[in-house]
Image (cartoon, rainbow, N blue to C red):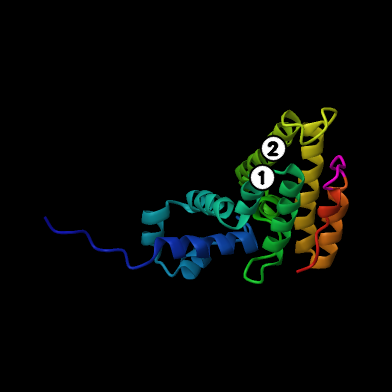
Amino acid sequence: MPRGRPRLFNPDKALDAALMLFWRHGYEGTSLAALAEAMDINMPSLYGAFGNKESLFRKALVRYIERPASYLSNALKTPDVRLAIRKMFQGAIDMVMEPGHPDGCLLVQGALASGPASEWVRRELSQRRAGAEAAVRRRLERAVDEADLPASTDPARLARYLITVLWGMSVQAAGGATREQLLDISNHALRALPPDHKVAKLSLHSA
């Protein structure tokens, strides 16, 4: 039985290229022609491997969460909750300050850039952001259960505050904020955590 023709492109590299383009220009600002050029792929192969533009964006979004934005899930695995939140902010700063990355956060910038024709983009990104907030809330709830945070802590309210600061830092980064300015913002946010004997270790420092 004859074998099918091998693909002449690397699907992983092609998806990474698509992610960078969506991240930089948003869903509506990225044309199929620009995607095909950046991915070094012809249109039939693009459709065959990734489906339509919407399908490709969803795949790129998963890629974003599993790779550049994985700092959040990795940070929340840290046993000490205060250190976990510190690592969350540090990871966000490192991601937006990475020279090879576009400015800001795809989950925030993509939603701001989408218009009426792409309402589904806003809904999708809103759900992803809500999922991130829920993950932080669950981590704070666990900390309360383990007595790592006082029983009086309101995990839902605290998670909402921390994640709002996190997304706000992305907007600031896209607007040209420096690493030092983002560190200052995050250090103020860390003070929202109930203090204990480890509080002195929470301050972030410029690399």
Q: Nearer the viewer, residue 15 or 76?
A: 76
Crowding around mark 2 (Cα neighbors within 10 Å: few <14, some 14 to 19, many 20+) is many
Q: Residue at x 33, y 68 (%)?
A: 8
Does the residue at mark 2 contact the one at mark 1 (Cβ under 8 Å)? yes
Q: Residue at 74% of width from left, 47% of height from top? A: 85
Residue 154 rendering spot, x and y as whole percentages = 82, 31
90 and 41: which is toward the camera: 90
Residue bearing mark 2: 139
Query: What secondary structure is marked by label 2?
Result: helix
Residue 177 appears anywhere in the view: no
Q: Residues within 10 Å of mark 1 (few under 14, many from 20)?
A: many
Question: Hey, what amino acid is under mark 1?
Answer: Leu
Question: Is residue 19 at all visible to an observer of this figure?
Answer: yes
Secondary element at image label 1? helix
* x and y percentages locating residue 12 in the rendered image: 44, 61
The quarter in which the N terminus is drawn is bottom left
Q: Counting residues from the N terminus, which is met first, the one under dot 2 or under dot 1?
A: 1
Name the residue furthest left: 1
Q: Amino acid at mark 2?
A: Arg
The magenta region covers 192-198
Tell me where residue 205 appears, x and y as whole percent: 81, 64
Is 196 inside the magenta-drawn segment? yes
What separation in Å lies between label 2 and label 1 (alpha carbons)? 7 Å
**Residue designated by label 1:** 76
